[in-house]
Amino acid sequence: MTPSQETDAASRFETLFDQLPDPVVEFQHDEDGDPVIVNANAAFRDVFAPVDSVVGLPLNELIVPADRRDEAETFDARTADGKSNSAVIERATATGRRKFLYRGVPVGDDRGFAIYADVTEKLQQERHLDVLQRVLRHNLRNDVNVITGEVERALASVETDETRAALRSIEETANGLTQLCTEAQTIRRVLGEPPAVEPVALDAVLDSVSKDCLRRFAQATISVDCPDDLMVEADSRLRIAVDGLVDNAIRHNPSSLPKVTLTASTLPDETVELTVADNGAGIPESEQRVVTSDETITPLSHGSGLGLWLVKWVTESYGGSLAIDTPDDGGSIVRIRLSQAGD
């Protein structure tokens, strides 16, 4: 690179550095290992120290609260060892303490960059939603228990088939609300953490799901066809997703003898296709479109539950895909494509 090109590159970097919307600071460790500010962009000065220049100031003394100094020193030691940092932290700003997603990047010679993305409102919102969902789940379960209890009492003394059918419909609807609440809780728990994808033995997952579901539904028949030791790129959430598919295929099956077939095979492109086929009433086409496409969810097309959404989101987190077929002879076939893993 010529001197002119180096000058142009430095100029472009300086422009990018100063225009970044998140606070960014460049620092260098002094003889005691403490970070001293070498450069800071406009966003850093606006958030932490609304002055013309912060160059030469000790970074920790400027933004780290006294009760967070040990944490900051740990980050400094990692930077000095050439290691990156990433954590949600709390720092002192010009308007009070705020929470940030902090990322520290060493660049050699005891220098480094620190980037601070303010996540205060996001974390507060997540906390509020968590409280709201917990209260709603608790109250919904209690109310449904009251409804089903009263329905059972009424069924014991009802005299007409018409009234009995109406009460059974109420009971079924109440149980559906409980199931929906359970699915929502599962989704929040399962998708709350990023995937830790690794090789997973698919045959072991399918065998485990089959045994558990047969314990819950003794009247069902579940068959598994999967090559031994077929490995896919997934994690522990795959079992939860497959269990949900099989559970729903049996639970919502009007047949007196529900049947589910789990089949796994390797495709020519070295991906793995897992199919879950049943002899039920079939998944409505409107629900299929909502789950498998980008169709807008409206009051007229919202699907009957959250189970398929869980499968879709888990599958996509692995880089896979979900498809649904409705054969002419009835039932449903859910197809999951996953990447094949090495031994």
Image: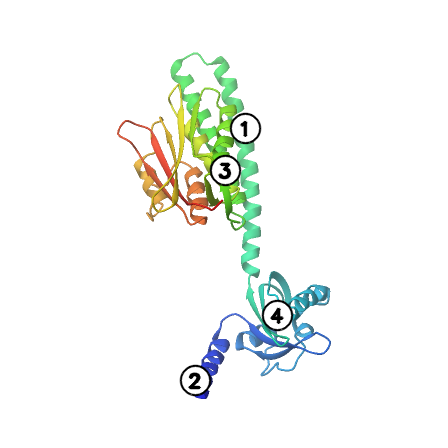
Mark closer to the chain start, 1 or 4 = 4
Mark closer to the chain start, 2 or 3 = 2
Please tell me whether mark 4 or mark 3 is closer to you in this view: 3
Tell me the SS state at disc 2: helix
Q: Which residue occupies the foreground of this view, 118 or 229?
A: 229
In the picture, the disc for residue 269 is: none
Residue labelled with disc 4: 95
Residue labelled with disc 2: 5
User: What distance separates the C-alpha of mark 1 from that of mark 3?
Assistant: 29 Å
Residue type indicated by callout 4 = Thr
Q: Position of residue 197 (x, y in %)?
A: 50, 48
Mark closer to the chain start, 2 or 1 = 2
Q: Position of residue 236 (x, y in %)?
A: 53, 42
Residue labelled with disc 1: 145
Tell which residue pokes out farthest to the left in this image.
328
User: What distance separates the C-alpha of mark 2 from that of mark 4?
Assistant: 41 Å
Residue labelled with disc 3: 239
